Image (spheres, rainbow, N blue to C red):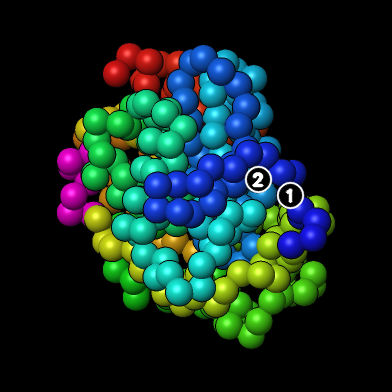
Amino acid sequence: MSATPIPEGQYLTTASGLRLHYQEQGSGGTTIVFLHGSGPGASGYSNFKLNYPELAAAGHRVVVPDLPGYGLSDKPEDQEYVNDFFVATVHELIEGLDLGRVVLLGNSLGGAIALGYALAHPERVQGLILMAPGGVEEREAYFEMEGIKRMMALFAEGPLDFDAMKKLLGFQLHDASQVSDDVVAERVAICADQPRTVLSTMRVPNMENRLGEITCPVLAFWGVNDQFNPPGGAQKIAAGCPNARVTLVNRCGHWVMVEHRDYFNRACIDFLAHEVAAA
């Protein structure tokens, strides 16, 4: 890639040989690792650029990686992009940067990775912040959602142009006018060198029956108008995780951190100052 479509941060080569790109800001406080969702052209920056600077300004250390297959990180074509692979990669990142105990903040696929990581490494997780996480339904339930159908169909046709990407991202939001041209351009550029296997091999297990094992504080958000992950998952998180606080957000699609960013940022900062700090 000759020019970076997103601001270039730092790189870490993991123990397994993957070169991961990440943004980092802040120091002290709680260390928060942001885990972005899937989809054509996704990156940590494009998902969370309205959020992580605010949490860093509140006195926390934030690390925002691009998952393998996304952003400026390595994109191996022969890799199966299953949840266990992402969990293992996130663990290598946390170990490689010597982050200690962390709060994982994830939306969609990133939320499923956060759940999987908390189950695999509970001793490393201080808390979870989840936005419409995957991993609480069978695969068929997700593929019945209109947004997933359109995403898979468009990505299968090849790299998306600006107009197709803008239309697709509009399904992420209740108010499609909030899709900025900057985000569209960022994702079109990233999408150009994403292998088709990023989505075609993606598999996330249904972890609903194991939610009771996640005893750390959990803050979860779900948009009532989500077209990618069934909003009924909010009840599963609320009922399954013993220390969860779940908010259903009206007039909100799949990206609560974009459509209601001020509310989201304030709620996260409050959660970190009270529930996580007291845990």
Report the residue marked by disc 2: 45
Instruction: Please give left or right for residue 238 compared with residue 45 in the image.
Output: left
Report the residue marked by disc 1: 6
Residue 213 covered by magenta stretch: yes
Using the rendered view, name the quadrant where residue 202 is placed: bottom left
Q: Are marks 2 and 1 in contact (CB under 8 Å)?
A: yes
In the rendered view of the protein, which quadrant contains the N terminus? bottom right
Amino acid of disc 1: Ile
Using the rendered view, name the quadrant where residue 193 is placed: bottom right
- Magenta part, dominant SS: helix
Q: Which mark is residue 62?
A: none
- Residue 68 in view in this figure: yes
Amino acid of disc 2: Tyr
- Residue 263 in view in this figure: no
- Compared to 89, does 41 lie above or below? below
Pick out the residue farthest to the bottom: 157
In the rendered view of the protein, which quadrant contains the C terminus? top left
- Compared to 229, does 192 lie above or below? below
Marks counted in the figure total: 2
How would you rate the neighbour count of disc 2 (Cα within 10 Å): few for under 14, some for 14-19, many for 20 or more?
many
Dot 1 falls on a residue whose secondary structure is loop
Q: Residue at x 33, y 14 (%)?
A: 278
- Compared to 83, does 97 lie above or below? above
- What span is colored magenta in the figure? 208-214
Q: x and y percent of residue 6 in the render?
A: 74, 49
